[in-house]
Amino acid sequence: MSVKRIGVLTSGGDAPGMNACVRAVVRTALYHGVECYGIRRGYNGLINGDIIKLDEKSVSRTINRGGTILYTARSKEFITEEGQQRAVNTCKFLGLDGIVAIGGDGTFRGARALSHHGVNVVAIPATIDNDICCTNYSIGFDTAANTAIDCIDRLRDTMQSHERCSVVEVMGRNAGYLAMYVGLAVGATAVLVPEKHIDFEKDVIEKVRKARLKGFTHFMIVVAEGAGSAADIAAKIKESIGLDPRVTVLGHIQRGGSPTARDRVNATKMGYLAVELLLAGKTNRVVCTNEGSFLDVDIDEALAMNRNIQSMEVNVLDAMTGI
Ligand code: F6P
């Protein structure tokens, strides 16, 4: 099948680097003489025919911009058979020969539904949660991690001067990859993630205690949002040992900002590969990366995979925290 026209959408939570990825999709398509259309507001845009033509100019100077120029949404309508049928009809009406869907696992489920309805789709992982099992890196993770690290370094300055305890809540939905990575990078006193059972006395109180006995007078507790709220953990620390921790919820700050070099370059490579796959007639694929090499995996297989925090990370964390 010759590919004349493709669409690109961003869906779910935005992630820094999405624009770099859209740009790469557009440029690769144009390079091959293929027209490219932006579908706005995720799968809702596909249902409602909310599209714009993308040319060189529309993506120029976007590689360094956070957010997504295509807007994003979590579509409730697209979950229904009727919504999916309307989206398929839009593809047929507009003559779209393929779609590149950029986002997290909800986006992948949408891509799979489209593909099962006969629309050629390639998905690209972009989520700060880094919880897509078929790839060890998702676009946006690196920027979000560096933003969180920068924020916590700043907090540490004042925690150190005032000799206080800080509890910082990091995003990640049900996954602790971001919190674990950030916790290791800032040298946290304790890190709490949903993948690991929490024994409050051992995992928090004893670590703070050990740190104090070794001479430290400020403490940094990093908690993944999926492992509990920073406010609750601070309250429990106060009740247990009388410290009065300060609470910081980093929230959406982690999703904004100019993407790091790693996010820009990987987003560019992944966008390029997705278009190449569509041009080769592939569908229902996810572009993945594993230690620097890029590959593609069937979406059904990708969604059936499991992954957990590596035991090595847990061991390293145990050795590094509480001191
Ligand atoms: O999936 C990305 C993410 O930022 C999660 O880490 C977080 O739980 C969620 O999105 C927040 O969603 P919203 O932007 O809809 O509040």
Image: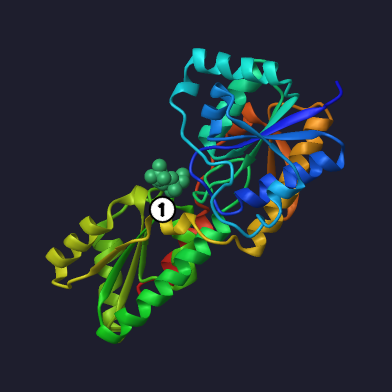
Q: Position of residue 15 (x, y in %)?
A: 54, 50
Splitting the image into 4 quarters, where does residue 237 fall?
A: bottom left
Q: Is residue 276 visible?
A: yes
Query: Is disc 1 surrounded by few (<14), some (14 to 19) or many (20+) residues within 10 Å?
Result: many
Splitting the image into 4 quarters, where does residue 10 fall?
A: top right
Q: Residue at x 26, y 83 (%)?
A: 163
Splitting the image into 4 quarters, where does residue 134 fall?
A: top right
Is the residue at mark 1 in contact range of ligand 1, meaning its CB lies under 8 Å from it?
yes
Q: Which residue is mark 1?
A: 171
Q: Residue at x 49, y 49 (%)?
A: 129
SS under mark 1: loop
Amino acid type of the residue that numbered disc 1 sits on in the rendered structure: Met
- The one nearer the camera, 37 or 24, is 37
- The one nearer the camera, 260 or 198, is 260
Q: Position of residue 286 (x, y in %)?
A: 67, 36
Q: Position of residue 58 (x, y in %)?
A: 69, 47
- The one nearer the camera, 128 or 93, is 93
